[in-house]
Amino acid sequence: MNAILTLPVGEQSDFDSGEVYFIGNATTLIRFAGFTVLTDPAFLHKGDHLHLGHGIYARREIDPACQVADLPKIDLIVLSHYHADHFDHVAARDLNKDVAVISTKHAVEELHTLGFANGRSLDTWESQTVRKGDARLVVTAMPAEHTSDYEIAAMLMPVNGNLLDFYDGERRLFRLYISGDTMLHNRLYDIPRHYPDIDLGHFHAGGTTLFLTTVTMTGAQAVRCAEIVKPVVAIPIHYNDFSVFHSGLDDFKKAAAESSTSVRFHYLRHGDRYQFSANR
């Protein structure tokens, strides 16, 4: 575990209720227990293109719900991996470079070259504790695999899922899982064994296809991931923003409707908010 990251205390923390604001793609703003967490910041406009490496470009199909200037003060960025659809050049230009970023070792090194020097890298199952007054946030890297094709995997960036545990002192109030850009793989079954009682899950879908290989879950696969991880509520994200996505929200909804899981599925469009309450 990295050294504890201590943040200055601002306004009085709300330990009772929180919010997820869906900006688009994998970009969300999570506000709870005094923390403001930004995930996978990407703010390109509709029609803009980004380079995914190896001569592959993607076009943004939908505008994000806001821009960096519209955001409140960010305490922490949680980044699944360093790909241009998860940390784009707009984010690199406009975000405060002093903000702490938790991600893979590769992403932290790449962001350091862009001036983001406050990076904390995690390997699978490693954790980073962040304190803000009486509030505590523990971010733990979850297993994720962009693809099981070893040749393609060598061409892609390493990726983490993440688990966010929010505490008031020693009392855990809420547990949030973020799949990251992963495919289905056997280590997902370890997550509910090590970390049961997940309150909310964000599942990266979209069926992203590169080199004729699917490198993020289709809608049906993302539903299966939710069945494995077993959050109380599952929200699909990362499903329609870029031209390399080939499995939209309708695929997820169809699979969810056919699932016998007890997981409740909730759907957000760009700009929607999901309100949640602490476990007391």
Image (spheres, grey):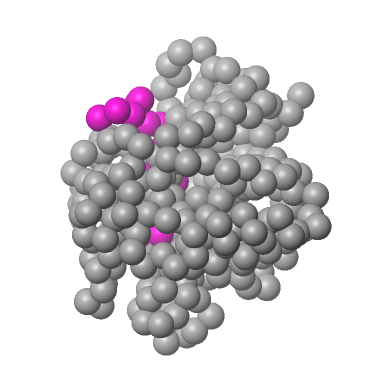
Query: Which residue is located at x 43 percent, y 16 percent?
Result: 10
With respect to residue 11, does 135 lie above or below? below
Residue 47: image x %, image y %? 22, 54
Magenta span: predominant SS is loop
Residue 139: image x %, image y %? 55, 45
State the quadrant of the C terminus: top right
Query: Which residue is located at x 72 percent, y 65 percent?
Result: 189
Q: Residue 66 lies in what quarter of the image? A: top left
Residue 131 visible to the viewer: no
Residue 249 visible to the viewer: yes
Q: Identify which residue, 231 or 81, lies in the foreground.
A: 231
Residue 223: image x %, image y %? 65, 59
Residue 229: image x %, image y %? 70, 56
Query: Which residue is located at x 25 percent, y 30 percent?
Result: 69
* Residue 29 horizontal side relative to residue 226, left or right: left
Q: Residue 70 lies in magenta, yes or no?
A: yes
Q: Residue 124 lies in magenta, yes or no?
A: no
Q: Identify which residue, 68 or 269, lies in the foreground.
A: 269
Segment colored magenta: 69-82
Q: Residue 81 lies in what quarter of the image? A: bottom left
With respect to residue 13, does 254 lie above or below? below
Q: Identify which residue, 65 or 195, lies in the foreground.
A: 65
With respect to residue 16, does 235 lie above or below? below
Query: Which residue is located at x 41 percent, y 65 percent?
Result: 245
Q: Residue furthest bottom?
A: 151
Q: Residue 56 lies in what quarter of the image? A: bottom left
